[in-house]
Amino acid sequence: MGWLTKILKGSKSPECQCHLKHHQDETTPEKARFSDTSSDFDKEEIDRAIAISIAEEDDKGKKVIDDESRLEEDEKLAKALEESLNVKSPPRSSPYDYISSFPSYNPFYNPSGYRTCAGCHSGIDNGNYLSSLGAVWHPECFRCHACNQPISDYEFSISDNRPYHKSCYKYLHHPKCDVCKHRIPTNGGGLIEYRAHPFWPQKYCPSHEHDGTPRCCSCERMEAIDTKYLILEDGRKLCLECLDSSIMDTHECQPLYLEIQEFYEGLNMKVEQQIPLLLVEREALNEAMEEEKKDHHHMPETRGLCLSEEQIIRIVSRKPRIGGYRIIDMFTEAYKLVRKCEVTAILVLYGLPRLLTGSILAHEMMHAWLRLKGYSTLSPKVEEGICQVLAHMWLDSEIYAGSATSSSSPSSSSSSSATSSSDPDPALSGSSKKGKRSEFEKKLGEYFKHQIESDSSTAYGDGFREGNQAVLKFGLRRTLDHIRFTGCFP
């Protein structure tokens, strides 16, 4: 009613106004003019009062609306606070937090608001508590599973749903050396530093690379300190798993040699000449390499050799006698090489597993084939590279295309039939060891392939990769024809 009040108080001379309204019939013309003037003035005042009143009411309306909106927000906030007592707050990035809410279902909390510590199983009164691992805890009850001391750090580790100080977890789960079984020490910078085999899942202390810890001469694994090795006559150490399929003498290797010859025939690369295959000790292999006049490229540790000169070679004629993890008797004899063609013999180091012996033999057989077919003056990169390609192909054929048993393999059956008709010696029968592969032998074959593929040398490594790429793209026959005419890979 503010506008009505304005109307009543709008005139500056209310007595006059009243007076005029009370004596209206008795007014003189002069007074009438005054009255008319006053009436106009009053109308203006009334209009002005009404406008002001309307404006004030608008302001009051806005205030009422603002008050109502603020009241609504307060009610919503109160409702949210009430609901937060029964609803879990959203998870935070921290492993645990001091919080005031928890899951709706929790064995350590009931709907009445009573909380039970997962550590001491007593009630948690008002105050700070932890929520972690699906439970609530007194801060002093949340303890490391290793040292049993409270965990007050912002971050901690979990293993098997048990909390650990980060330092305790690191100590308990510190990597151990596969050789000495001790925890691998940290380096000068406080970091754990160890060596890892590029193929086998092994990690060991860096010191073992220089402290005389033995490695197998075949698989090159560094075994645990208490692991037994067979120590060969020339000082090489052979692990017992590699020993299981090793070939120890020239006589035992002949069936494998026949298999390699059949592999080459299957590629239409038959070697017509009868080339002797001889297993020798390391010393005899090194002497033969020095006697060889042609300056061929060789690996840092030579395991095979294709000879072109006449020599007298001391070969391993019979399987060595083993006793107490050592070779106690070696049976060797002199063998004179006679030059009937460009190749006089193929030598392979004795005592290596069948798959490694076969890959070396396939490599050296390719050297022989190249010489017999007139591929002369090839660069080491091209010649060694294509020989490695053939060794890799043979390993592939053995690992993926080989049959489970020797009886189902055409090559091994023909080998065994040939040997049984010519030599009844039971030691020779089945000596190719091409029976059912053990899981380790399959893995060993993959390792020998990995060695060829990852070789870092120019002649053997880069040569293999370029040659293998050429064979995959153009095929073996076209690659060999290109090498014959150009002396390089296509």
Image: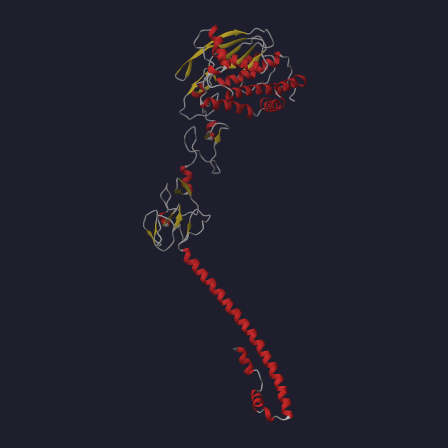
**How many numbered discs, if any?**
0
Q: 111 or 206: which is nearer to us?
A: 111
Q: Residue at x 50, y 9 (%)?
A: 314
* Image coordinates for residue 177, horizontal then vertical, percent: 43, 31
Q: Residue at x 45, y 60 (%)?
A: 77
* Image coordinates for residue 466, horizontal then vertical, percent: 61, 24
Q: Which residue is outermost to the right?
A: 485
Q: 72 or 307: which is nearer to us?
A: 72
* Image coordinates for residue 400, horizontal then vertical, percent: 51, 22
Q: Where 243 falls versus 179 (above or below)?
A: above
Q: 288 or 410: which is nearer to us?
A: 410
Q: Report the side of 206 relative to 481 (left or right).
A: left
Q: Where 175 falls versus 454 (above or below)?
A: below
* Image coordinates for residue 287, horizontal then vertical, percent: 54, 13
Figure colour scheme:
secondary structure
- Residue 287 can be seen, yes or no: no
- Residue 223 can be seen, yes or no: yes
Q: 177 or 481: which is nearer to us?
A: 481
Q: Quadrant of the C terminus?
A: top right
